[in-house]
Image: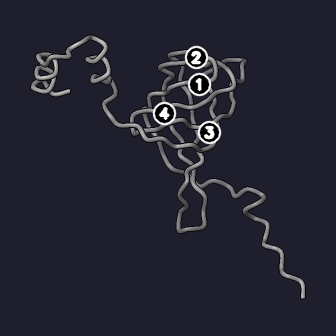
Amino acid sequence: MPHAELKAFCYGKHCTMSGLKDKMDRRETGRFPLREGVRYRLLNVRGEHVSGSGNTLNIGSGGILFTTEDMLPVGRSVEVSVDWPAQLNGNCPLKLVAFGRVVRSQAGQAAVRIERYEFRTRGKTAAEMTPPMAASA
């Protein structure tokens, strides 16, 4: 929040701490509601395979919030793969693969700060590969 806007907000009639908290957001980038399938796995886990799947709740260039099967440990490195809604050349499914750290976690969801990401092609599902049935005469 710019300083002038903060000053104007606090000197107005209705300046409260809860109102100020609502106006201030620690995120540096916006988030967009996106509901797509996600797969995740913790990185650098010795002798333990922690992975699962869920759905995105929102996403931005700086982070992603998604549902989880288990509570993920805050501070751990994680790889998150999101089924991307767009296709390459109109026929090749894509996925967003992001690497980052878990910054918030509770039962059923986790927030990850994205440190780097890339788009990769995603294999087609069986339904996408099955040709449509020919109409019988």
Q: Which residue is mark 3?
A: 38
Q: Are marks 1 and 2 in contact (CB under 8 Å)?
A: yes
Residue type (three-letter) at the residue carrying disc 2: Gln
Label 4 crowd (10 A; few <14 / some 14-19 / many >=20):
many
In the depicted structure, whether residue 121 falls above or below residue 47: below
Q: Which residue is mark 2?
A: 106
Question: Which circle, 3 or 2, is nearer the viewer?
Answer: 2
In the depicted structure, whether residue 104 falls above or below residue 51: above
Gap in Å between the C-alphas at discs 3 and 2?
17 Å
Q: Position of residue 107 (x, y in %)?
A: 63, 17
Which corner quadrant of the image does residue 7 belong to?
Answer: top left
Residue type (three-letter) at the residue carrying disc 4: Ile
Which corner quadrant of the image does residue 29 belong to?
Answer: top left
Q: Are marks 3 and 1 in contact (CB under 8 Å)?
A: no
Who's the residue at 78% across and 73% down the image? Answer: 132
Give residue 64's mark.
4
Q: Are marks 4 and 1 in contact (CB under 8 Å)?
A: no
In the shown orientation, is residue 32 left or right of residue 105? Answer: left
Gap in Å between the C-alphas at discs 4 and 2?
14 Å
First of labels 3, 4 by sequence position: 3
In the depicted structure, whether residue 123 falls above or below residue 39: below
Q: Position of residue 87 (x, y in %)?
A: 55, 61
Q: Which quarter shows the N terminus?
A: top left
Q: Secondary structure at mark 3?
A: strand
Q: Which quarter shows the C terminus?
A: bottom right
In the depicted structure, whether residue 11 falls above or below residue 33: above
